[in-house]
């Protein structure tokens, strides 16, 4: 205690460190709770879809019947598979050569200077940082995937993510078997703020994306043109969510960054080269209740049949080399406007 009755700076620092540790542990607990809730919802939907699919397809042998029908028409299923494999090999070779020439640009894209207000360092006794302000780095990072073999990177300290997805042979050889819902590949960066007042929270996320998305359906024989189930669909979505447990719940805004749809004999691709996307979410929040901000990238892809395929990789280099993460949250800025009742 000082001579004037004030606490010694070292005592204040210890109290500040203890408060920060308690706050950080509370933030991590809230983030893990939000992630657990999302995982439960995904698992419930997946389980329901699997049960429904089993009931609908019970006793069906559509793949076997189709193969027998094609054999009677004089088509060799084994030969079709070999021809499709050769087409796939040729396509992959051309794809690697095409993407090898894409270099990551050095020039960075940023939001206008008005959004790059840096909050002052939080003092021990001073007021909270004034709004608007930007947050860096993220508090945490999460990842979920239906296939653990998919390559991914997630780093909260640099606010970067790298995600990938591949899909083929969905629905069996001809793509006509009933299949359950497949959860998307999802990577999320998490941030936290404490709104001092209630109102409309404006969340502005600037995201830089580098990567590739391919889809197509090989056609080793024109006789397969009848198979409308053989297709390939892909989509990449940027989603910003706010989570305020005990307050306004979950609010979100989704932005499709690219999507492809192909049927038999068609191919398509999409390339991002540090393309900038700005996602703005206006969320209602209550005062003095923590708000988690989630910036998420979701990959969805379905290559139906043995001839349909989808490949998505959000890395600086094409798979399998991958390189550095291809998604960067360059700026996450917030502003809070009080609710006015006229």
Image: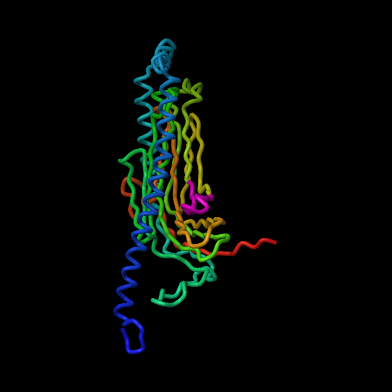
Q: Is residue 299 visible?
A: yes
Which residue shows up at 40% across the image and 58% down it? 104
293 vs 239, nearest the viewer: 293
Report x, y in % for residue 278: 52, 57
Report x, y in % for residue 296: 44, 51
Marks counted in the figure total 0
User: Quarter of the image containing the N terminus?
Assistant: bottom left
Give the answer, above or below, for where 294 lies relative to 178: below
192 vs 125, nearest the viewer: 125
Q: Residue furthest bottom?
A: 3
The reply, left or right, for residue 133 in relation to residue 90 is: right
Q: Which residues are magenta?
A: 237-253
172 vs 337, nearest the viewer: 337
Which of the 4 image quadrants contains residue 280?
bottom right
Which residue shows up at 37% across the image and 19% down it? 77
Give the answer, above or below, for where 45 lies relative to 269: above
Report x, y in % for residue 46: 41, 33
Q: Is residue 245 magenta?
A: yes
The reply, left or right, for residue 215 in relation to residue 15 is: right
User: Quarter of the image containing the C terminus?
Assistant: bottom right
Which residue shows up at 43% across the image and 19% down it? 57
Q: Is residue 175 visible?
A: no
Q: Residue furthest top?
A: 72
Q: Is residue 98 magenta?
A: no
Main structural element of the magenta stretch: helix, strand or loop? strand
């Amino acid at each position: 205690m000082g001579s004037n009755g004030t606490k010694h700076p070292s005592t204040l620092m210890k109290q500040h460190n203890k408060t920060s540790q308690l706050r950080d542990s509370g933030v991590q607990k809230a983030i893990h709770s939000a992630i657990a809730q999302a995982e439960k919802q995904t698992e419930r939907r997946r389980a329901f879809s699997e049960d429904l699919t089993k009931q609908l397809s019970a006793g069906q042998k559509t793949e076997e019947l189709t193969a027998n029908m094609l054999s009677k028409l004089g088509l060799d299923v084994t030969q079709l598979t070999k021809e499709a494999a050769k087409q796939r090999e040729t396509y992959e070779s051309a794809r690697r050569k095409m993407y090898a020439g894409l270099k990551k640009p050095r020039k960075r894209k940023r939001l206008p200077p008005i959004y790059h207000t840096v909050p002052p360092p939080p003092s021990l006794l001073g007021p909270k940082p004034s709004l608007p302000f930007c947050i860096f780095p993220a508090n945490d990072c999460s990842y979920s995937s239906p296939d653990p073999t998919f390559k991914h990177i997630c780093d909260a300290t640099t606010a970067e993510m790298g995600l990938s997805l591949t899909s083929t042979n969905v629905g069996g050889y001809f793509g006509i078997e009933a299949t359950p819902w497949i959860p998307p590949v999802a990577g999320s960066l998490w941030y936290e703020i404490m709104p001092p007042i209630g109102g409309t929270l404006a969340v502005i996320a600037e995201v830089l994306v580098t990567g590739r998305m391919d889809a197509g359906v090989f056609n080793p024989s024109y006789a397969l043109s009848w198979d409308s189930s053989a297709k390939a669909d892909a989509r990449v979505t940027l989603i910003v969510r706010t989570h305020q447990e005990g307050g306004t719940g979950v609010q979100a805004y989704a932005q499709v960054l690219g999507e492809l749809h192909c049927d038999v004999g068609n191919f398509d691709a999409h390339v991002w080269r540090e393309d900038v996307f700005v996602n703005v979410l206006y969320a209602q929040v209550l005062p003095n209740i923590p708000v988690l901000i989630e910036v998420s990238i979701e990959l969805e892809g379905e290559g139906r049949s043995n001839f349909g395929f989808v490949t998505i990789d959000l890395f600086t280099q094409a798979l399998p080399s991958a390189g550095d993460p291809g998604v960067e949250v360059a700026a996450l800025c917030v502003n809070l406007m009080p609710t006015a009742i006229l």
